[in-house]
Image (cartoon, grey):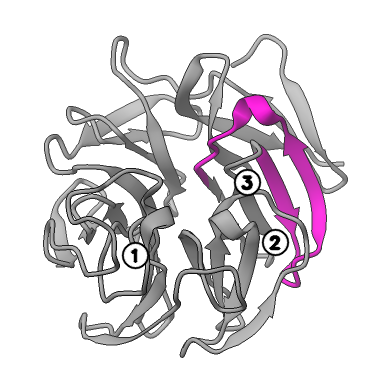
């Protein structure tokens, strides 16, 4: 652990930051894209490495195992489901893949490398592709995130090369999509994350519009959170309905209510490019961000302090 730990946050949302919590094998390259925690407290890092893309750690940061070599083009999101299986979003393969914790592939949504017509050049796969989207298209064009409702229906944000949310039945049938590029209500500029809250609402991090938009499950806009956010990248909601958001374009972490009211915030511009956040059963946070090791992102643990 860090010799001198920084304390961040306020009130019930105060944490001790451990910069060097993550201890991968010596010499392994780590460029973290996303993080998730299963019900047993194992921490999974989706890593932009061809050799070691899925890294698994215990709560203390001890390395347990890895898998997935050569399977992914551009790791973007990892999310543990209620059965501790893992949804992984590969942005550039345009696929959502479900794996067991040990790396056995269970199902795939999307055809590898097939990109819908959105006005973006078919061979353009950079992070500013959202600027060239002229119209919404079907699934998928550089997708970003996935979440499921209790019935197993899937909601996918299709953001870098598209400007839509897609809804699928539990069997993978495409049901509906909504969204067009723009800044108006219900429009998107890089929908980067999706979360289904316990009210059944679809929370969408509309990253380059600096906002969260809230919809029903058929795409009807319910509200837009008025709290100022700077490039909200990933949404996580804990068992107490507390919302955690990393603000990619400002290097901030915000803690909010389900009404979008901010409860706490910390960070600074040197942490720009924050790209993941989740919470374990102890209330500790795992945040994907840059740090003193340079621009490369790692998973930083925030141990919750009881106040």
Nearest-to-viewer mark from 3 and 1: 3
Q: Is residue 254 magenta?
A: yes
As measured in the structure, the alpha-carbon distance from the residue carrying label 2 to the one carrying label 1 is 22 Å
- Residue 42 visible to an observer of this rendering: no
Q: Quadrant of residue 43?
A: top left
Task: Classify 244 as above or below 153.
Answer: above
- Looking at the rendering, the stretch of residues picked out in magenta corresponds to 252-276
Question: What is the crowding at mark 1: few (fewer than 14 residues within 10 Å), some, or many (at least 20)?
Answer: few
Question: Where's the N terminus, which quadrant?
Answer: top right
Residue on which disc 1 sits? 83
Task: Classify 163 as above or below 279.
Answer: below
Residue on which disc 3 sits? 247
Give the secondary structure at mark 1.
Answer: loop
Q: Earlier in the sequence, mark 2 or mark 1?
A: 1
- Residue 94 visible to an observer of this rendering: yes
Q: Position of residue 275 (x, y in %)?
A: 50, 42
Q: Position of residue 196 (x, y in %)?
A: 51, 74
In this view, the residue in front, 118 or 263, is 118
Q: Is residue 136 left or right of residue 259?
A: left
Residue on which disc 2 sits? 242
Q: Position of residue 291 (x, y in %)?
A: 57, 21
Q: Is residue 182 left or right of residue 62?
A: right
At horizontal 81% and vertical 41% (from top left) the residue drawn is 306
Q: Is residue 273 left or right of residue 17?
A: left
At horizontal 49% and vertical 86% (from top left) the residue drawn is 219
């Amino acid at each position: 652990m860090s010799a001198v730990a920084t304390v961040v946050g306020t009130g019930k949302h105060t944490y001790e930051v451990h910069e060097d919590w993550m201890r991968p094998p010596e010499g392994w390259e780590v460029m973290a894209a996303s993080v998730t925690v299963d019900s047993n407290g194992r921490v999974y890092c989706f890593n932009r490495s061809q050799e070691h893309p899925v890294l698994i750690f215990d709560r203390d940061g001890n390395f347990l195992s890895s898998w997935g070599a050569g399977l992914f083009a551009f790791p973007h999101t990892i999310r543990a489901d209620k059965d501790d299986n893992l949804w992984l979003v590969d942005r550039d393969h345009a696929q959502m893949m479900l794996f067991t914790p040990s790396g056995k592939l269970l199902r795939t949504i999307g055809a590898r490398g097939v990109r819908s017509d959105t006005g973006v050049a078919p061979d353009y796969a950079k992070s500013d592709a959202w600027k060239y989207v002229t119209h919404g298209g079907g699934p998928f064009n550089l997708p970003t995130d996935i979440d499921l409702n209790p019935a197993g229906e899937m909601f996918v944000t299709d953001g870098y090369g598209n400007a839509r949310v897609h809804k699928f039945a539990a069997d993978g049938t495409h049901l509906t999509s909504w969204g067009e590029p723009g800044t108006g209500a219900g429009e998107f500029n890089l929908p980067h994350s999706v979360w289904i809250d316990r009210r059944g609402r679809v929370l969408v991090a509309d990253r380059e519009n600096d906002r969260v938009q809230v919809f029903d499950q058929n795409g009807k806009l319910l509200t837009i959170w008025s709290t100022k956010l700077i490039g909200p990248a990933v949404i996580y909601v804990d068992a107490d309905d507390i919302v955690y958001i990393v603000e990619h374009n400002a290097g901030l972490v915000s803690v909010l209510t389900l009404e979008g009211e901010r409860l706490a915030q910390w960070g600074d511009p040197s942490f720009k490019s924050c790209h993941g956040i989740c919470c374990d059963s102890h209330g500790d946070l795992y945040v994907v961000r840059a740090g003193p090791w340079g621009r490369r992102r790692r998973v930083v643990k925030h141990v919750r302090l009881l106040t």
